[in-house]
Amino acid sequence: LIHTVALICTAGLLSAVSAAAAPLSDGDFSPIPVGRDPARLRQRVALNQWRKALDTVTGKSPEAHFVRGWLAARFNDHARVERELRGVPERLPLLAARARVLAAEALMVLGREADAATMAEPVAKDPGPVGRYARRLVARGLREAGKLDEARTVYQLTAASGLPAEVPIALLGQARLEIDAGFPDKALPLLKRIDLEYPAHWTGPKARKLAEELGGAAPALKAQWDDRSLADHLARGERLADSGWYTTIINDLGPLSGRKMSAGQKCIHRYTLGYA
């Protein structure tokens, strides 16, 4: 997105002549005025002077509204973002997905979670990175709007995708949903799966913190969290080794040295522990 806006600003502001034509080339673009002083705009963008840059964009085109919305997001003026991007997705198909995501993020911060989910939903159908991020916004917006059944469906579909970058985020989101719904017993297995299968992902520490809170309130849940097979420990250790969490590996696998293991398990244990 930064590259997109930088390209727009650097050229004066670009627009495709025809989105339905053959693959785009430089000849398909023409400069669109953004204000009386495009050189100053480029300079302010280069210096990260977002507020001043926004004031320089005085054009009335949907492209100009998009740039103003993007600039407003840089300094967290979420109301301005939402205002600038109204109607832009429909008027600017080339950047519709980006505009919807920006608007959805702003709506979320403004406390309009259901509107955020609605805004992001068309983009969520895209299989690419922007679509995957939009699905997160949809699920979170539905969850925070209290539409738990709909949010749960989105989380479950995302978790079923098998994408390593998306599954732990979906599991954490659903775990929070189950906690909000009053079902900590449904949340704990989701948190435990994150800890076992994605222990070094950024969701890992959050999952462990939530599980600790749940276990502190319910001893049965703590026992369920602590109930792990030798295979669980070894597989988790290997995943941690891949991410360089060596101190954690030593703390986790070191105490297992006296346990009965098969020859294969002993090999994995010694290698992983020695590597750490």
Image: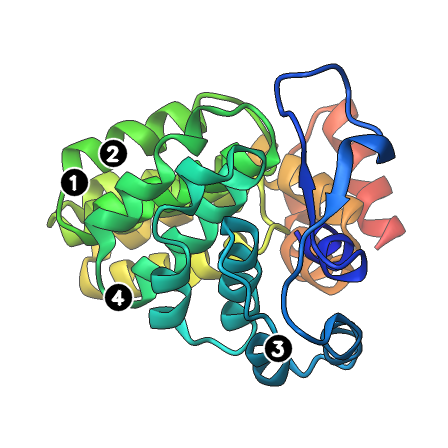
What residue is pinned by disc 2? 152
Circle 1: residue type: Leu
What residue is pinned by disc 3? 56
Decide which of 33, 81 is in the foreground and name it. Answer: 33
Q: Are marks 3 and 4 in contact (CB under 8 Å)?
A: no
Inter-mark Cα distance, 3 to 4? 55 Å
Q: Name the residue: 63% across, 70% down.
A: 35
Q: Are marks 1 and 2 in contact (CB under 8 Å)?
A: yes
Q: Are marks 4 and 2 in contact (CB under 8 Å)?
A: no
Circle 3: residue type: Thr
Q: Name the residue: 70% across, 41% down.
A: 239
What residue is pinned by disc 4? 216
Decide which of 41, 177 is in the foreground and name it. Answer: 41
Inter-mark Cα distance, 1 to 2? 6 Å
**Is disc 1 placed on a helix, strand or loop?**
helix
Decide which of 256, 118 is in the foreground and name it. Answer: 118
The mark nearer the N terminus, 3 or 1, is 3
What residue is pinned by disc 1? 148
Inter-mark Cα distance, 3 to 2? 44 Å
Circle 4: residue type: Gly
Inter-mark Cα distance, 4 to 2? 25 Å
- Asked if residue 71 is positioned above or below residue 237 in the image, the reply reads below
**Is disc 3 placed on a helix, strand or loop?**
helix
The crowding category of the residue bearing disc 3, from other C-alpha atoms within 10 Å (few below 14, some 14 to 19, many at least 20), is many
Q: Position of residue 221 (x, y in %)?
A: 25, 50
Q: Position of residue 45 (x, y in %)?
A: 73, 74
- Asked if residue 200 is positioned above or below residue 134 in the image, the reply reads below
The mark nearer the N terminus, 3 or 2, is 3
